[in-house]
Amino acid sequence: MSTDATPFDTAPAAPAFAQDHAARNKLVIALLLVSTFVVFLNETIMSVAIPHLMVDLGVTASAAQWLTTGFLLTMAVVIPITGFLLQRMDTRPIFMVAMSTFTAGTLICAVAPGLELLVLGRVVQAVGTAIMMPLLMTTVMSLVPPEARGKTMGNISIVISVAPAIGPTIGGFILANLDWRWMFILVLPISIGALALGARKIQNVSTPRYAPLDIVSVVLSALAFGGLIYGLASFGEGMAHAGEAPTVPLWLPLVIGGVAMALFVWRQLRLQNEDKALLDLRTFLSPNYRVSVGLMLVAMMALFGTIILLPIYLQNVVGLDTLQSGLMLLPGGLVMGLLGPVVGRLFDRVGPTVLVVPGTVLVSAVLWGMTLVGQDTPIWALLAGHVVLSIGLALIFTPVFTSSMGSVRKELYSHASAILGSVQQLAGAAGIALFVAVMTIRTALLAAAGLDQVEALAGGIRLAFTVGAVISLFAILAAFFIRRPEGGGPEMGHGH
């Protein structure tokens, strides 16, 4: 029997062999979890650094914003291609490509003399980051039997929630005490360590198969996801600097992205019957997958919109500094991470509905509560609100990931995880753009009406949270329709 075959494709082997397989699979998943944690931590460490970098490098806000926008754009372009890569390449080489690229990008950032090279380093980092998450998800779905997936997905949710939550805190601490380059210098040895350990220990646990690469789909995907995310990021940025004339009309990238997306979908529908699609949209034949992706879209919009608004509110309305506002977001992130494995085990026992429904209700309740914030809102109330929001999101993410991925046929896992990753990026960009745009327009109107700047900003933030609260009601509705996959899902026919 080939050592590349997954243990769930084959008849039960001798106990010793099965134990070897189980130990190997655990090690591979653990290494992927650690490596994904490192790349996710890097994603948000930068979020508090933009004002510092503007001063240190002598650049404008819109130029410095490319450190975030460039990263998001690269992720958007690379993630759709991961479905193809995961089919064609084995676990070990694709891991080596992802971590080597990320490490090289981190090194470029650490030694960058100016903004141009720093943006290049961020783009190189993003290529590695984009591959890691779909690789982790697809590997887990291939190696872990359905009855134990919730627990493993709970561990993945630690990576997804804790790393981004502690990123701003670590970033704030470094910037308060050290030069900005230390954000990359400190990540570099961890990244090299993960790469070296992976090079020695990671084994091939997938079975590569031939998958054609449709170049037209790659170009359309880059224009579609890149255009939409750049358009949304530019829209948010344009709103934040409403007085400046934009170099490109704000609507143009969105129109290009929208047209390219329509052409991309049309081409995938034509190619998927011959198994030649870059992203196989037959994943959406599963009603459970469709609802899960919709719920993920709403949850991610709420999460990213809140992550961007809370620091603005804490620093510009309440008057906290960067480190204090980073520390304010830390307890929520840690609670979310600690709950991940607990929620995962509960999912294995009771299924998604009893977890996701209360989760969406909690998220919505906090967002409605945030519509009441002002200059005199006590810090403890904000801290409690963020912790409750994090509990709600913890109850949503693990069940939604596990239900969605378990509802598609095994050969579509790589496509399903690539689509989920692309939706996360789009939702994040849309959430940020929407919340920032609403906040900015409302703030400008209130300031024009004679309110002082801080009070006007508080009013803008309240309205942005109101929009988020209304969107969250759709998540509550969707939560009632998520079902536990039946032995791998209704679409897991074995006649394929």
Image: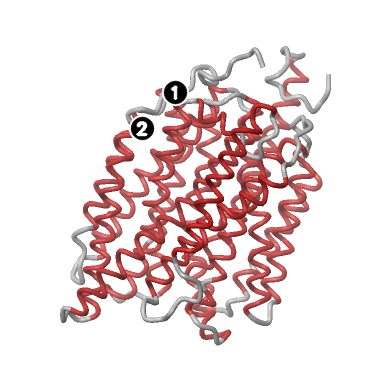
Q: Residue at x 72, y 61 (%)?
A: 103
Residue 51 image offset from top left, x and y in percent: 47, 78
In the rendered structure, which disc, 2 or 1, sits on the residue that comes first in sequence? 2
Point out the frontmost of discs 2 and 1: 1
Residue carrying label 2: 355
Q: Residue at x 41, y 60 (%)?
A: 432
Q: Residue at x 39, y 46 (%)?
A: 299
Q: Is disc 1 placed on a helix, strand or loop? A: loop
Residue 438 image offset from top left, x and y in percent: 30, 64
Total number of numbered discs in the rendering: 2
Residue 323 image offset from top left, x and y in percent: 43, 72
Displayed quadrant of residue 126 = bottom right
Q: Which quarter shows the C terminus?
A: top right
Q: Is disc 2 placed on a helix, strand or loop? A: helix
Closer to us: 446 or 486:
446
485 left or right, relative to 25: left
Q: State how far apart marks 2 and 1 are (Cα).
A: 11 Å
Closer to us: 130 or 341:
130
Against 124, residue 51 (above or below) is below
Label 2: few (<14), some or many (≥20) within 10 Å? many
Q: Which mark is residue 235?
A: none
Displayed quadrant of residue 328 = bottom left
- Name the kind of residue labelled 1 in the image: Arg
Label 1: few (<14), some or many (≥20) within 10 Å? many
351 left or right, relative to 314: right
338 left or right, relative to 362: right
Residue carrying label 1: 484
Q: Which quarter shows the N terminus?
A: top right
Q: Residue at x 61, y 37 (%)?
A: 268
